[in-house]
Amino acid sequence: MKPAECGSLESFSFGDSPEMADELLSLVLSGRKTATCWGVCQGEQTHVGKTMVVRDGSGAPAAVLETLELVKRRFDEVDAAFAHDEGEGDRSLAYWRDVHRRYFTRHGIFAPDMELWCERFRVVARLSPSG
């Protein structure tokens, strides 16, 4: 599939830097990362069945993802299964809590009881360069 075939799909990048976007995208494309989360205060950015384009750190379209599940849960209620599906580090809940606490603190929104949108997704298509 070519990026031009994605029509008017919304797009996003993971994380808050080009390096993080590339790192997390690589986990998605390898099949290791099948979940993500963000603060409820950042809005409900998707819904079950929605497809979106994920971009790499340079902003280039890389893949189309489909939301399979979207659940609201508190930071301190995220379980080991969800942490594992996020695919980061050693995939443990302790690792997940540490890196996400630091991420949300950087953005000024961390609280142990903060509400998150917890999403599970699948890769629908990998996007090849348009050239």
Image (spheres, rainbow, N blue to C red):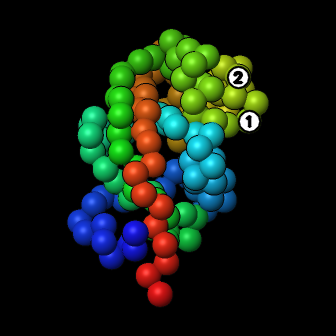
Determine the secondary structure under disc 1: loop
For this orientation, the residue located farthest to the left is: 8
**Residue most extreme to the top:** 77
- Give the residue type that dot 1 points to: Gly
Determine the residue positioned at 36% across, 23% down: 71
Secondary structure of the residue carrying tag 2 is loop
Decide which of 122, 117 is in the foreground and name it.
122
- Residue 9 position, x and y percent, is 27, 60
Q: Residue furthest right?
A: 90
Relative to 120, does residue 57 appear above or below in the rendering? Answer: below
In which quarter of the view is residue 18 placed?
Answer: bottom right
* C-beta proximity under 8 Å, tags 1 and 2: yes
Q: Is residue 123 left or right of residue 28?
A: left
In the image, which disc is placed on residue 92?
Answer: 2
Q: Which mark is residue 35?
A: none
Q: Label 1 to label 2, Cα distance in Å?
A: 8 Å
Instruction: Determine which residue is flagged by label 1.
Output: 89
Residue 39 picture location, percent across and down: 43, 32
Is the residue 4 above or below the residue 23 in the image?
below
Relative horizontal placement of residue 129, taking residue 64 as reference (left or right): right
Quadrant containing the N terminus is: bottom left
Q: Position of residue 111 (x, y in %)?
A: 52, 21
The spot of residue 12 in percent (x, y) is: 42, 56
Pick the residue in front: 47 or 109.
Answer: 47
Instruction: Name the residue located 54 percent from the left edge and 63 percent from the top edge.
Output: 56
* Residue drawn 41% across the image and 18% down it: 73
Can residue 98 be seen here?
no
Residue that lies at the very extreme toward the bottom in this rendered image: 131
Q: Residue at x 26, y 40 (%)?
A: 49
- Amino acid carrying label 2: it is Ser
In depth, the one of 107 and 120 nearer the eye is 120
Q: Is residue 79 visible?
A: yes
